[in-house]
Image: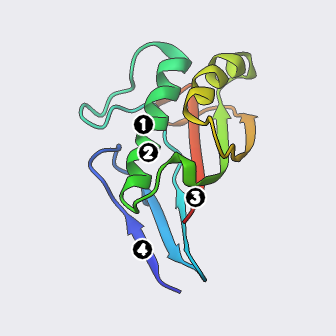
Amino acid sequence: MKFTTIKTADAPGAIGPYSQGVSVDTAPGRLVVTAGQVGLDPASGNMVPGGVQAETERALKNLTAVLAVEGMTLENVIKTTVFLATMDEFAAMNEVYARYFTRNLPARSTVAVLGLPKNARVEIEVWAVR
């Protein structure tokens, strides 16, 4: 099995001992699994202002950048996991999420967690295939 680490300057760098994503050759295609992305601006390294909607938008842009390294888009995504600081922000997150996933809707799990890196309101990870 060929395992490739994904790295791009168009998404925030890892803030610990992990990769932005990994890809694996499978028969007959390729599988990409990303690390969770929060609303960090890759240029400044700071969280975007504006709350859960702005953070969701930035997280999805970061995921788009990671997938692009392997020639994929959000249309290749088969599974997402969304971590929220509170389920009270589900509707606001979902409004932005729905603008990015309009066709080939992936399976999704959404959970509330006690805390997220950098005090983020939302973190999203994806699995994609080609």
Q: How is the image coloured?
A: rainbow
Q: Nearer the viewer, residue 78 or 38?
A: 78
The amino acid beneath tag 1 is Lys
Dot 4 and dot 2 residues touching (CB under 8 Å): no
State whether residue 15 appears in this view. no
| Mark 1, residue position | 61
Say above or below: 17 vs 49: below
Say above or below: 51 vs 102: above
Residue 23 drawn at (x, y percent): 48, 69
Residue plotted at (73% across, 16% down): 88
Residue 16 drawn at (x, y percent): 42, 53
- What is the CA distance from the residue labelled 2 to the residue labelled 1? 5 Å
Q: Nearer the viewer, residue 113 or 98?
A: 98
| Mark 3, residue position | 128
The amino acid beneath tag 2 is Thr
Q: Secondary structure at mark 3?
A: strand
What's the mark number on residue 64? 2
What's the mark number on residue 4? 4
